[in-house]
Image (cartoon, helix red, strand yellow):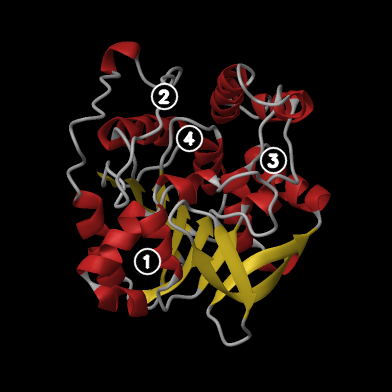
Amino acid sequence: MRPLLVDTDIGTDVDDLMVLAMLARTPELEPMLVTTVYGDVSLRRDIADAACRTLGLSLPLAAGLSTPLSGGEVFWAGHEGEGIIEIGERSIRLDAGGDGNAVEAIIEASHRWQGRLEILAIAPLTNIASVLLEDPSAAGRIRSLHVMGGDFTGALEGPEHNFACDPRAAQIVTAAHIPIVLCGFDSTSRIMFRESERDRIAGSGPSGRLVADQMTRFWDFIDEWAPPEHRGGNMPHDPLALLTMLEPDLFELEAVRVEVSDDGATRVTPDPASSTRIVSDFDPDTAAERILARLAP
């Protein structure tokens, strides 16, 4: 058994939901806990709970920290939860603050599965950084940390979203002595799912219909502001990070030291002795098919 903890900001981009849908069909990993972070973490927890019930996943959930360690305004799209939970249940509380229970839950999980716990962090790194601040020894109890975050080749004009939302947290986590794999936007942007992939997913049953519905809703949202080449589709950012855990042989990894600026931009320096690795290359077509095979077998 490979115990897994997923730290997520589910509700805005559809890719977090895709990860949960993949895990429902992934016997290699055993999800033990889902924690939510950034913004209305209680609403995110409710979204994750409703999604897990549709997907056939039964596992505990904990709301974490709503406010980034770096401060700053939280980005909130406004459609979070639509199509997953009833509108009447969507009570957005951006100023209420998180209860922080997720931080305690992650620390407890690191003790329970000492040396075996794997973490998939597909959100701003506020919860994970707070764990390391509260209990620095937790770093030694985590087997691996796989992160969707950063941009290591300048694919974006500015910093990547997850790191930009909480640069201080990204600095803390990337400096920790944990075996880390960083799957950056420069890698995840090499895959785009469009109508053919959505229709294939929709045909795979109730869970597929839920994912396909959320893909369409997210496309409608980004079509209002995204560049033309990104409209009518989405990049499976978080599923690719999960795939680095499931099928590491698909990826070329480079050991590096990572520097995160105060705005979330990254600079890497090759360092063979480093425990932090970034995805440097992979075959996008193969990776896309492996993701789809788990979403729509």
Disc 3 and disc 1: Cα gap in Å?
38 Å
Q: Position of residue 70 (x, y in %)?
A: 32, 51
Disc 4 and disc 1: Cα gap in Å?
34 Å
Q: Which residue is mark 1?
A: 172
Quarter of the image containing the C terminus? top right
Extreme top residue here?
88
Q: Residue at x 22, y 71 (%)?
A: 135
Q: Is 105 on the left-hand or right-hand side of 207? A: left
State which mark lies toward you, 2 or 4. Answer: 2
Whether label 4 touches label 3, CB < 8 Å: no
Question: Looking at the image, is mark 1 or mark 2 earlier in the sequence?
Answer: 2
Under mark 2, the amino acid is Glu
Extreme bottom residue here?
273
Q: Which residue is mark 4?
A: 55
Is disc 1 surrounded by few (<14), some (14 to 19) or many (20+) residues within 10 Å?
some
Under mark 4, the amino acid is Leu
Is disc 2 surrounded by few (<14), some (14 to 19) or many (20+) residues within 10 Å?
many
